[in-house]
């Protein structure tokens, strides 16, 4: 999985006043938790995190917080309800030798039989949550739709990946080929 480096500054002020002061400086308050170490409250530059937030990719984040190196994954982001800028971020510490859960984007490959017959491919999930050791985490999960016919779906339970555990429910639909009017008309014409 790709990594991204971000510099952080420890915070000493907490509460409404402290976070407002941090935001006024163009920084976003954040917290790093997990493992046996204490949680770290820090702030990151809003410009530095844009490449982390506004992308379909998932990253392992390598922090430099006042000289201390930490590795983490993004767990949650709170956005302003009107202006849509990040207000607070939560990161989960990556511990070597222990599995980490992260959302990984999917990549669809192949030409579906159902699409060739006039059906339409619909994608219900753009990312799937997986658990695995950091060294086995992929940049994306490949899903082959070559054998997918009209009216059929691929569910999370149908997918298997080496060294990874899928955490979404097995009954979650990832993608499907649905019947279109054109396909329905072609099927009716062929039946006559």
Image: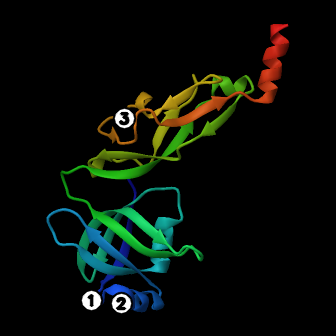
**In-image side of 160 versus 79 (left or right):** left
So how many labels did they put on this image? 3
Q: CA distance from mark 2 to mark 1?
A: 8 Å
Q: Are marks 2 and 1 in contact (CB under 8 Å)?
A: yes
Mark in front: 1 vs 3: 1
Numbered tag placed on residue 12 in the rendering: 1
Query: Label 3's element?
Result: loop
| Residue 47 x/y as whole percent | 49, 78
Mark 1 and mark 3 lie on one chain; the one further toward the N terminus is 1
The answer to whether residue 45 is above or below residue 99 is below
* Res. 141 mark: none
Q: Which of pointers 2 and 3 indicates the residue nearer the eye?
A: 2
Residue 96: x %, y % from top left? 19, 56
Question: Image quarter for residue 146?
Answer: top right
Rounded to the nearest whole Å, what is the CA distance between mark 2 and mark 3? Answer: 45 Å
Q: Which residue is mark 3?
A: 161
- Mark 2 vs mark 1: which is more N-terminal? 1
Query: Residue 49, percent across and down?
Result: 46, 73
Q: Residue 31, relative to residue 23: is it above or below?
A: above
Residue indicated by mark 2: 18
Earlier in the chain: of badge 2 and badge 3, it is 2
How dense is the environment of label 3, judged by Cα within 10 Å: few (below 14), some, or many (20 and up)? few
Label 1 neighbourhood size at 10 Å, few (<14), some (14-19), many (20+)? few
User: Which residue occupies 31% across, 73% down?
Assistant: 31
């Amino acid at each position: 999985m790709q990594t991204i480096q971000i510099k952080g500054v420890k915070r000493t002020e907490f509460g409404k006043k402290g976070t407002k002061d941090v935001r006024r400086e163009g920084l976003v308050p954040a917290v790093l938790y997990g493992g046996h170490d204490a949680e770290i409250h820090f702030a990151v530059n809003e410009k530095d995190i844009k490449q982390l937030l506004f992308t379909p990719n998932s990253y392992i984040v390598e922090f430099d917080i006042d000289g201390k190196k930490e590795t983490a994954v993004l767990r949650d982001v709170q956005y302003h309800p009107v202006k849509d800028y990040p207000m607070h971020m939560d990161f989960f510490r990556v511990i070597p030798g222990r599995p980490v859960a992260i959302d990984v984007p999917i990549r669809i490959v192949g030409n579906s039989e159902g699409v060739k017959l006039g059906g339409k491919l619909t994608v219900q999930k753009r990312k799937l949550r997986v658990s695995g050791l950091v060294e086995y985490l992929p940049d994306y999960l490949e899903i082959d739709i070559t054998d997918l016919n009209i009216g059929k779906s691929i569910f999370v339970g149908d997918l298997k990946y080496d060294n990874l555990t899928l955490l979404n429910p097995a009954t979650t639909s990832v993608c499907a080929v649905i019947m279109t009017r054109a396909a329905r008309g072609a099927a009716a014409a062929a039946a006559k």
